[in-house]
Image (cartoon, rainbow, N blue to C red):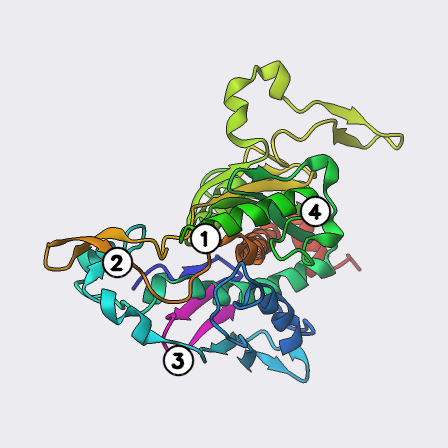
């Protein structure tokens, strides 16, 4: 299977299936000398692991990170870093009744058409559990970015019809909220909505907003590897993502240029800044020094308990089938940290590429003063 590798300099290769022995990632291109221990990775994995509250799957997994290589005496060595998370609570029997059926909204039919074979146990490689590897790698990327004064923050912007109010945002509450919603009033409404979905044996969609703060201007390659293009690819590769918007996103189609352009001003020190940020911190595919802002839209969980018609592998239509197993009624809360991870991976890789964009950057590292 091609397509399991991401990045140019900071490259990750992920592996593993939902009901296999484990999930893992190999990171290549991590600079030597970064202090790194399993606890650095674990704090990110704990934010996405299942069974945390009534709004996530009941699957119980420790999701404990094991660093197998690339770290010696507490620091990265510059060699590939291999991270393993073992699967401990698989219930493959839950999928026995649908092994010959194609679940609506899933990639079952597509896998069969592409490979002539599929792992029906939770979707195998297409399972949301695959994102463990992304989060583990993203934790390393985020730590490197942190040493450069760059931080990534994400939160649930909407759940079903409920949206946060920008005037009520309290980012300190994001990871206290079981829904990852930093607006207590919106969170209460969203909880009621999700409970109504669960009662109806249904699920909910939603969206995540992610911001990169402290990013310097000049990041991104201006043709095929634009910052926004690479972010869109990385974020769209997350299962269940159906749209990625940069800055104000699709609403800009309703504006005039005079309404949408971000005008520059000078501060007291004569440093230019933008008075607005409709562009989301990216112009011409290159960061402009403002916060980089993306909005990621997730579809409702496809596995629902309500009976649905399903197509069989034999071509027969089965009118009313229920999906058993332990599934999230809502993907968004656990996806917030996945969005953070993919954003961190994309930004770090472009930062490393940017080191070769100017002679003075090379001279700062390798240059020697004339004697």
Q: Residue at x 59, y 54 (%)?
A: 340
Quick check: is 240 in the magenta stretch? no
Asked whether disc 3 touches disc 4, contact meaning CB atoms under 8 Å apart, the reply is no
Please state if 119 lies on the left or on the right of 270 as rendered: left
Q: Which residues are magenta?
A: 12-30
User: Mark 3 highlights which residue?
Assistant: 21
Dot in front, 1 or 4: 1
User: Mark 4 highlights which residue?
Assistant: 184
Q: Residue at x 54, y 64 (%)?
A: 135
Q: Earlier in the sequence, mark 3 or mark 4?
A: 3
Please state if 301 lies on the left or on the right of 359 as rendered: left
The dot on residue 199 is 1
Give the distance between the C-alpha atoms of the residues marked 1 and 3, in whole angstroms: 33 Å
Q: Earlier in the sequence, mark 3 or mark 2?
A: 3
User: Mark 2 highlights which residue?
Assistant: 108
Dot in front, 1 or 2: 1
Looking at the image, the residue that sits furthest to the front is 199
Asked whether disc 1 touches disc 3, contact meaning CB atoms under 8 Å apart, the reply is no
Bin the neighbour count of mark 3 within 10 Å (Cα to Cα): few under 14, some 14-19, many 20 and up: few
Please state if 138 lies on the left or on the right of 319 as rendered: right
Local SS, label 4: helix
Dot in front, 3 or 4: 4
Asked whether disc 1 touches disc 4, contact meaning CB atoms under 8 Å apart, the reply is no
Residue 166: image quadrant is: top right
Give the distance between the C-alpha atoms of the residues marked 1 and 2, in whole angstroms: 26 Å
Q: Nearer the viewer, residue 200 or 162?
A: 200
Bin the neighbour count of mark 2 within 10 Å (Cα to Cα): few under 14, some 14-19, many 20 and up: many
């Amino acid at each position: 299977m091609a397509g399991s590798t991401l990045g140019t300099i900071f490259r990750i290769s992920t592996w593993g299936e939902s009901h296999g022995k484990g999930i893992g990632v190999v990171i290549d291109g991590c600079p030597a000398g970064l202090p790194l221990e399993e606890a650095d990775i674990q704090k990110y994995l704990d934010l996405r692991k299942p069974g945390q509250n009534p709004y996530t799957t009941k699957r119980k997994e420790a999701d404990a990170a094991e660093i197998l290589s690339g770290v010696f005496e507490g620091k990265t060595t510059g060699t590939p870093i291999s991270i393993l998370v073992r699967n401990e609570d698989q219930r493959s029997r839950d999928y026995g009744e649908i092994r010959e059926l194609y679940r609506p909204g899933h990639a079952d039919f597509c896998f069969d058409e592409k490979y002539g074979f599929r792992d029906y146990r939770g979707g195998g490689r297409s399972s949301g559990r695959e994102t463990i590897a992304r989060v583990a790698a993203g934790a390393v990327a985020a730590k490197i970015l942190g040493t450069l004064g760059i931080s990534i923050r994400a939160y649930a912007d909407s759940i079903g019809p409920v949206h946060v109010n920008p005037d009520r945002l309290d980012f300190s509450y994001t990871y206290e909220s079981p829904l990852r919603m930093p607006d207590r009033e919106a969170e209460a409404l969203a909880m009621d909505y999700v409970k109504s979905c669960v009662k109806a044996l249904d699920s909910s969609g939603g969206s995540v907003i992610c911001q990169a703060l402290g990013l310097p201007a000049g990041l991104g390659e201006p043709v095929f590897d634009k910052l926004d293009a690479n972010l869109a690819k990385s974020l769209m590769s997350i299962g269940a993502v159906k749209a990625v918007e940069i800055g104000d996103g699709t609403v800009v189609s309703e504006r005039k240029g005079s309404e949408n352009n971000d005008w520059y001003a000078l501060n007291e020190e004569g440093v230019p800044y933008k008075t607005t940020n409709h562009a989301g911190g990216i112009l011409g595919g290159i960061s402009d020094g403002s916060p980089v802002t993306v909005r990621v839209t997730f579809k409702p969980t496809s596995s629902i308990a309500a009976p649905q018609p399903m197509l069989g592998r034999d071509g027969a239509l089965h009118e009313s089938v229920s999906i058993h197993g332990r599934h999230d009624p809502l993907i968004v809360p656990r996806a917030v940290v996945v969005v953070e991870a993919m954003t961190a991976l994309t930004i770090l890789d472009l930062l490393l590429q940017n080191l070769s964009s100017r002679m003075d950057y090379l001279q700062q590292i390798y240059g020697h003063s004339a004697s």
